[in-house]
Amino acid sequence: MKKPAKKSSKKPATKPLASFTGPLVLLGAGKMGQAMLDGWLGRGLKAQKVIALDPNPSKDIKATAKRGVKVNPKAGPRAKADAQAIVVAVKPQMAPDAVPPLGLYVGKSTLVVSIMAGRTIAFLEKALPPGTAIVRAMPNTPAAVGRGISVAVANKQVTTKQRKLASDLLSAIGKVEWVGDEGLIDAVTAVSGSGPAYVFLLVEAMTKAGIAAGLPPELAYRLARETVAGSGELLHQSTLDAATLRKNVTSPGGTTAAALNVLMGPAGFDKLLGEAIAAATKRSQELAG
Ligand SMILES: NC(=O)C1=CN([C@@H]2O[C@H](COP(=O)(O)OP(=O)(O)OC[C@H]3O[C@@H](n4cnc5c(N)ncnc54)[C@H](O)[C@@H]3O)[C@@H](O)[C@H]2O)C=CC1
Ligand SMILES: O=C(O)[C@@H]1CCC=N1
């Protein structure tokens, strides 16, 4: 007699957005919006389910229109659709004009995910129809290579199913962490949202310092770039923490120790980054509304 097929043999879903019923409205298809869209399409979201709204559509978003994404569909009653999700990826300064018209797409079970810096859940609740389920999230630009990290917080209207949907949308571009306290998002923005810029500045500064130490500019840039990228990959793959990896480079009385005496001194990295992150946190608070 034939054995019944084992249920456990079912493969786990590798394309979590394949069963997304849509539509998904993307407001703002710039650097972050495009990175997210690419991630979603890579995770099985059907291009036909996406409506992208952007008054200055980029070449990239126009290219996705050829795959079926509806870019700026004509306004009017036929454009209305209760979206399954709306992702807000316009600059926070555009929000007062750009967010309220999204009401056209908000139905009973629509989830709105905003990645705008500063703009609070309270601002979004005021700008959108009463009772809208909202997730505020802060991703970062390594999203473009699927290696971002997002921190998300939900309002009380968000259901378990919608939280799972938000996780699926955000995990298409990297790791996802949830917090219960929206007040943390300003510091998150300062550390991981803006953080890639600090790392790229490190490459620029190492390049300049290498040139000042006598290296040809292109060699200095290649050394700085590969050192930062390689160190990031080592940190990513290693089971050791950052402090241990740093100590592993540092021979007593050697060259690294000489450099770290400067970088870890009173006017060094800790002080500078502390001030930088405090300034970014304050700016995020100022952008609130
Ligand atoms: N760039 C970054 O590292 C990160 C940005 N964010 C947030 O993501 C959002 C977008 O940032 P980026 O992608 O860097 O900006 P961006 O300037 O690349 O993209 C913004 C897009 O919005 C479009 N736009 C302007 N007015 C609009 C309107 N009324 N309706 C629809 N679209 C409109 C623009 O044409 C542009 O394509 C911002 O709120 C930012 O705070 C969040 C995390 C990281
Ligand atoms: O600079 C900004 O305001 C945005 C938010 C985090 C990264 N870029």
Image (cartoon, rainbow, N blue to C red):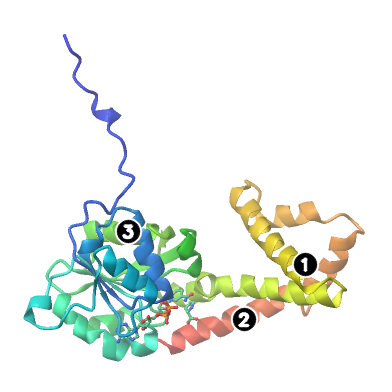
Q: Residue at x 84, y 71 (%)?
A: 215
Q: For this rendering, which residue is in front, 130 or 58?
A: 58
Q: Residue furthest left?
A: 77
* Residue 78 x/y as whole percent: 8, 77
Q: Quadrant of residue 232?
A: bottom right
* Residue 219 numbered mark, or none: 1
Of badges 1 and 3, nearer the viewer stands: 1
Q: Residue at x 36, y 55 (%)?
A: 42
Q: Amino acid at mark 1?
A: Leu
Of the two numbered discs 1 and 2 on the same chain, state the one appearing first in sequence. 1
**Image side of residue 258 versus residue 182, left or right:** right
Secondary structure under badge 3?
helix
Q: Residues within 10 Å of mark 2 (few under 14, many from 20)?
A: some
Of badges 1 and 2, nearer the viewer stands: 1
Q: Is residue 26 above or below residue 149?
A: below
For label 2, the residue is: 276
For label 3, the residue is: 41
Q: Quadrant of residue 117?
A: bottom left
Q: Amino acid at mark 2?
A: Ala
Q: For this rendering, which residue is in front, 202 or 54?
A: 54
